[in-house]
Image (spheres, rainbow, N blue to C red):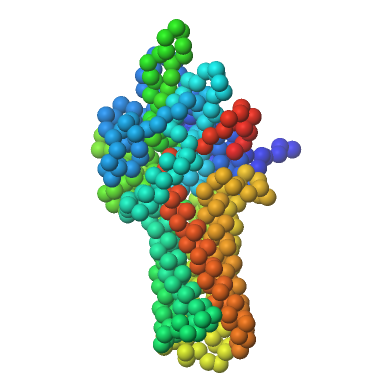
Amino acid sequence: MITMPPRNKHFHCHSREPFKDEKLALEHAEGPLGFLNPTRAHFHYPVPSGSDKHLAKGDESENSDVNGYGDHNPEQPNEQQDDEPAKNVKFLWRSRDNRKGRHALLVQRPEAGQDAPFLVPRKTSHYKEILKVIWLTFTYFPLWDISWLVAFIFTLGSVVWVLNGFFVWLPVVAPSTEFPNEIYVGGGVTAFLGAIIFFEFGSILLFFEAVNSNNSGCFGWAVEQLAEEKDGGQPKFQFSANLDHCRHHHQNRRNFVGKSSYRLAEEAQLKAQTTKDGKSWIWFPSWHDLRTHYLHELGFLAGIAQLTGATIFGVAGFTALPGIQNHLTPQWRLNAAYWIPQVIGGTGFIVSSTLYMLETQQKWWKPALKVLGWHIGFWNLIGALGFTLSGALGMAYGNSGAQYEAGLATFWGSWAFLIGSYIQLYESLDTHPVEEVSSAEDFNRTQ
């Protein structure tokens, strides 16, 4: 009897294995759950002979976008990249990073006296890199990038929910601050805006992001051989962020639901392509792809849970509007149309956040504390628990303590959503993360 390996140990469909036609060599693939697709894989970049000048697609471009921010970045290529030596380099493919248009490197730093054949950008956890991306979150607005747009919408929606938390909780804890119709109008309108416009619209975009994730793989780095060192030293290879040939649709500024800029350039040269990979955009996957691939993708399942929760939660947002909520009597009607949808919708958010956290983890029980995506899921989970608790407590009609705690749960849940959404905004602009380890054991161990 032949035993098939778990799905998380290999890419179930060869056509969906990233980099199958590239120079990158797959070392291993894995995921937290054996019956689902891999969520991460390590690829080795084979260093060719010293005669090769350019090692990656896009190196020949004189206008390489080294910093990865296109025309909006005022810095000149190569002038602002602070290179550091590296002994070994791997490309980290992660399903979440792939959806978000990110290209992660894992580097091993050399010890004193060790040979370092690679030059790579400094690690992204360096304070200068952190400050640079924080600055971009307030100054750079790539509206064509679906991952940035999702993060921006959720951030804006979270701000609205924070305002809602003040409207519904502050009058309870400090009655002297209440103004006329604060809870009825202010709370109702902000609940509608937060639930219908931001939660629902953002969740729909999350679905489209999941079904349009890149299948072929996108390296996203230019690798160039530098001049050989004297006295028989080994040649050095410099890694620089490069989006000129990025296959992710995030880089296409011509139309929101279109092909990557790489595909557009390719088509201009070849006139026409009829490959399956040439599809510009998928609004909904085929039933075959749904059964064989997407229903085994943690990111897709999380997006479906998020969209389902947001749609049900939207009922509560609609019934929160002035002129509707005050007519929901007796109490069971208010519970059915307002509080219960919050509980069910919040439960969907809990499931979604948990799956997003699980997607970033090496093991189902081991938190991925070094991965931004895990922290995004964690803070969204806290927010989801707050909103679910608020709906459950809201049904305790006539209990002043429960009403106080319901408003408080909305308040701290909103702040948790805001923290998670801002981290997601940061993640969408940190397109070329460089993760660093010092020992060979850590480098060879699954990250």
In the rendered view, tell whether residue 187 sits above or below residue 136.
Answer: below
In the rendered view, tell whether residue 323 sits above or below residue 37.
Answer: below
In the rendered view, tell whether residue 142 sits above or below residue 180.
Answer: above
- Seen from this angle, which residue lies furthest top? 231
Picture residue at 56% right of the left edge, 41% below the top: 40
- Give the position of the N terminus as an image quadrant: top right
Q: Position of residue 22 (x, y in %)?
A: 44, 30
Q: Nearer the viewer, residue 229 or 180?
A: 180
Relative to 358, 418 lies left or right: left
- Give the position of the C terminus as an image quadrant: top right
Quadrant in which residue 263 is drawn: top left
Q: Is residue 373 visible?
A: yes
Q: Position of residue 151 (x, y in %)?
A: 42, 57
Relative to 103, 393 lies left or right: right
Q: Nearer the viewer, residue 410 or 36?
A: 410
Q: Position of residue 64 (x, y in %)?
A: 30, 33
Q: Position of residue 356 (x, y in %)?
A: 55, 54
Picture residue at 29% right of the left edge, 29% below the top: 61
In the rendered view, tell whether residue 76 sits above or below residue 200.
Answer: above
Picture residue at 46% right of the left edge, 8% below the top: 232
**Disc count in the image?**
0
Relative to 291, 136 lies left or right: left
Relative to 228, 409 lies left or right: right
Quadrant in which residue 188 is drawn: bottom left
- Seen from this angle, which residue lies furthest front? 176
Q: Is residue 216 visible?
A: no
Quadrant in which residue 201 is drawn: bottom left
Picture residue at 40% right of the left edge, 13% below the top: 228
- Seen from this angle, which residue lies furthest right? 1
